[in-house]
Image (cartoon, coloured by chain):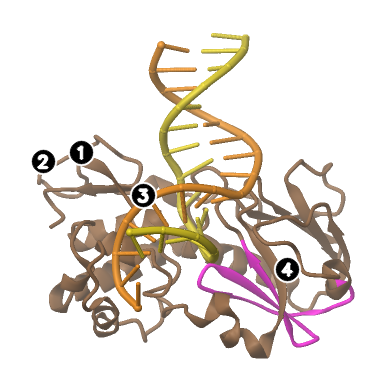
Chain colours: A brown, B orange, C yellow
Amino acid sequence: MPELPEVETVVRGLAPRLIGRRIVHVEQRRADLRSPLPARFAARLQGRRVVDVARRAKYILIRLDDANLFVIHLGMSGRLVLGPLRSRPPGPHDHVEFSTDDGSVVCFSDPRRFGLMDIVPAAGLDRDPRFAGLGPEPLSPAFTSTVLAAALEGRRTAIKAALIDQRIVVGIGNIYACEALFRAGISPRRLAGTIKNSRAERLVAGIKAVLEEAIAAGGSSARDYVQASGELGWFQHRWAVYDREGQPCPHCDCGGAVRRIVQGGRSTFYCAKRQR
DNA sequence: CGGTTGCCCTGGGGGC
DNA sequence: TGCCCCCAGGGCAACC
């Protein structure tokens, strides 16, 4: 699913199409997403004008002209598809659709229903429990090796698990954790607390580089993800290790093969020769 | 408390 | 072909 680059790509695709537009109609086909849609969901969106579209962590934040934020999380399998009015009959997983005053329709489709939608006051976002504990944005200048090393200090969990912990740093999921560790030459099994100095520098550089390249490529698309434009992203062709078990380690002459292990119930892919 | 496990849900792919 | 098991990009509650 959508990790930071995919969510950022959606935000960049939606922003020019939504900012300044008024939401004229909301169709809610089912309310039982990861958490139930808030009371009067459709009524509170209807008639509102979109002021801004932004991202925090893996959340899409649509700022409305009543000082509220329309918050969307895509979960594992959520998509936002932008299209013309009545372009097709709704599919079984098209849970929410809203149309704007220029005739566009945004459809939220999510087979597994791990996604969520909510409406919250923009001013109180820092006190919302979903946002209060979030770590720094990895692409901000504030995310440095010093900051990362301090967050990892004393932690006795594997660095791979720490990287996907949104309290340490946000936006990184299973794919980009594997890819960033490969670039940094760090074993996913290494204890998080041992990441400092040059290792922390390499890891921060690897994180920023892989996320920036993925955004530039328009986000990954393995199975479920479709850009706001409705076209597939292409970054999956550049995965060095993710989902490449048994294939030779790329970009180096170490002669190793990509291995798959399970950490915290999730697959990790890495080269045991290159990553220490 | 930090760290780990299991669950929410559906669909697709592989093995038999 | 059909069935069953396993797996999937996230996040959180419940456990040790």
The residue positioned 77% from the left and 41% from the top of the image is A91
Residue A127 image offset from top left, x and y in percent: 58, 86
Q: Does label 1 or label 4 sit earlier along the sequence? A: 4
The residue that label 2 is drawn on is: A255
The residue that label 4 is drawn on is: A17
Q: Are marks 2 and 1 in contact (CB under 8 Å)?
A: yes
Q: Does label 2 or label 4 sit earlier along the sequence? A: 4
On screen, A84 above or below A170? above
Provide the residue span drawn in magenta: A46-73
The residue positioned 20% from the left and 38% from the top of the image is A248
Q: Residues within 10 Å of mark 2 (few under 14, many from 20)?
A: few
Dot 4 falls on a residue whose secondary structure is helix
Q: Does label 2 or label 3 sit earlier along the sequence? A: 3
The residue positioned 37% from the left and 85% from the top of the image is A141
Dot 2 falls on a residue whose secondary structure is loop
Q: Residues within 10 Å of mark 3 (few under 14, many from 20)?
A: some
What is the chain letter for disc 2?
A
Task: Give the CA separation, mark 1 to mark 4.
Answer: 43 Å
Task: Give the CA separation, mark 2 to mark 1.
Answer: 7 Å
Left or right of residue A161, residue A274 in this image: left
Marks 2 and 4: which is nearer the front? 2
Marks 2 and 3: which is nearer the front? 2
Residue A6 visible: yes
Task: Give the CA separation, mark 3 to mark 1.
Answer: 14 Å
Amino acid identity at mark 4:
Arg
Q: Residues within 10 Å of mark 4 (few under 14, many from 20)?
A: some
Q: Residue furthest bottom?
A: A123
The dot on residue A238 is: 3
Could you confirm whether marks 2 and 4 are on the same chain?
A: yes
Amino acid identity at mark 2:
Gly
Left or right of residue A45, residue C8 in this image: left
